[in-house]
Image (tube, rainbow, N blue to C red):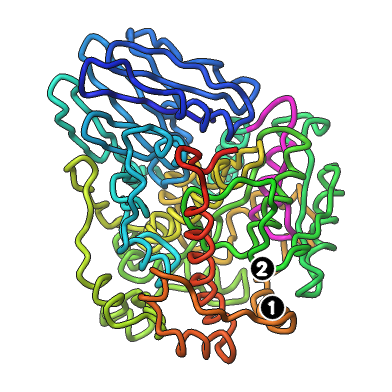
Amino acid sequence: MSAFAAVLHKNDEEPRIAGVAEALGSVTGRTATAVTLSRCALVAAPLHADDPGEPVRMASGSTAVGRMPCEAGEYAFAEWDPQAQRLTCGRDGLGLRLLYVAEARDAIVVTNVLAAALRHPQISPALDDESLIAFLAHGSPIDEVRTCYRDIRVLPPGHTLTIDARTFDARMCRHWHFPVPDGVRRTDAEILDEYRSLLADAVRDRLDPRGTSIFLSGGIDSTTMAAAATEVAPSSTLHALTTRYPRYVDDVELPFTRAAADRLGLPLTVFDADRHDPWHVDPIDPPLASPLDEPTLGDWRDALACAAKHGTIALYGEDGDALLRPPAWRALRKADSLTSIGVAAVRYAITAGRRPYIGLRWRERMGIVRPPAAAKPNWLTRDASAALDGSQPATVLGCATEPLPPHPTRPEAQSILTSTTISRHFAATIAPETTRRHVELRFPLLDTRLIRFVTSIPAIPWCQHKTLPRRAYRDRLPETVLRRPKAPLIGFNEGLVAEWRRNGADAARPADPVAGWIDVPAWTRTLQTGSPEAVMAAWRVGALDAWLTARSRMPKGAACTR
């Protein structure tokens, strides 16, 4: 997707776009092109060879930048209607693509590149202290729309924002809801055929016919995605890439990955993704526009640079675990009758040799299960913790987020896939503005059509231990891969922290203003003796301190670009 921006001036001055265009071009490596239409300027810098080289004139007479709404999802856009003098922008329902809305006294900037908003001369770089404290506490924003800058917001996922350029009134509404069951009854054979067909469509819509990388592991999600890719694209245009971590954990994944790649006829590159120490920064990369809780960003960037050798698109198998998460008892009962659930459970137990998950633990029966609240670290000062507790939800140009109603039959899957913490952090980590590598990750398993289908089929047996993809690709993947249970990456965090300590853990006192939010003795003790997870949370203090220091040294107007 192009790096893009829409700049709307509230007076009769021509929109100022020079710095904005420079920031967009720095992300994609290609010159940005602008079209100025009355008070609105649209700017686009293409990333892919088939991206439009300039803003696109629509049949309706409007001009647009970005990727327009599509069935597949993964889009963000801005559209200017010169006749109505109206700017409309929107973002996909799962929030995989970011879209920032920045407001000054005389200008509004909508863009998918944070640094581009900061390069507009009227947008203030003033920081939001509560959001910075939220980064320390949780590594994520304080709510769906706030950023670390006071005057810059993020359009919430699945929302459309409309701005009237004559009055500058704004209206925001939810246009996307988590897909609900379609009510169609299918046989087992029809379910398998339709799943394969939909996954093939999802992959096809995201491929680059000139060349596409596939991040491949030995698990079911990425291998079935790769199998679908080989069915819809010539193998000569596909290249598999797998990451391993020999510095920290034993490589148990690679034999399964090789077996899948060999069976599918895919060339495979094995990349060691633990070459750098935590928080490694390459001096040739520009500073981040906002702090990021990602200690292995250096290795992530290197892996994406490897993928970029084969094209500007890479497929990633996120997030089959959430998509196929089995619902608990209450959701099961809303989807089917007691008799149907009982028959399906017995049949599954007989054929699979294990009991299905049906959420009948007593706490679930009583309806008292609640997601655990994210605990604040014990090294936050009382004032910092109180600032978080007293924060109020932010708005976008005065418009509030419209909540997503609970899903009737897949509430757990919806909750995970639309989590603010996950979607914001994940979207920021994969954004080309962050990675600074000319490659875009795409996610076939998060295709809206696929989600709608999975919510429409019986959770027993299809969502039990990923029965659906295992059976759907029974004839395409090695039996060792299909029968393999889920194998999480065990020991990575422990190894990362242990080596950091061996190499001389640095617990230097953070500078102001970070020090005012930190109980330094408690923070130091956590770094020295805390669990790996606690230590990795404490690392955020150093990350924020380093980001603020780098930011203070940047020349004015050079906002996070090179």
Q: Which residue is drawn at 49% across and 25% down?
A: 21
Q: Which element is circle 2 on?
A: loop
- The amino acid type of the residue labelled 2 equals Pro
State whether residue 269 is above or below residue 99: below
Judge whether residue 223 is colored magenta.
yes
* Disc 2 target residue: 278
State yes or no: discs 1 and 2 in contact (Cβ < 8 Å): yes
Asked if the magenta segment contains residue 484, the reply would be no
Residue 411 lies, in percent from the top left, at: 34, 61
Q: Identity of the amino acid at label 1? A: Trp
Query: Is 74 positioned to the left or the right of 393 in the image?
Result: right
Q: In this view, does 434 lie to the left or right of 489?
A: left
Residue 228 higher or lower than 527, as above or below: above
* Observer able to see residue 113: no
245 left or right, relative to 198: right
Range of magenta residues: 207-230
Q: In which quarter of the image is the N terminus?
A: top right
Residue 500's mark?
A: 1
552 or 12, which lies in front?
Answer: 552
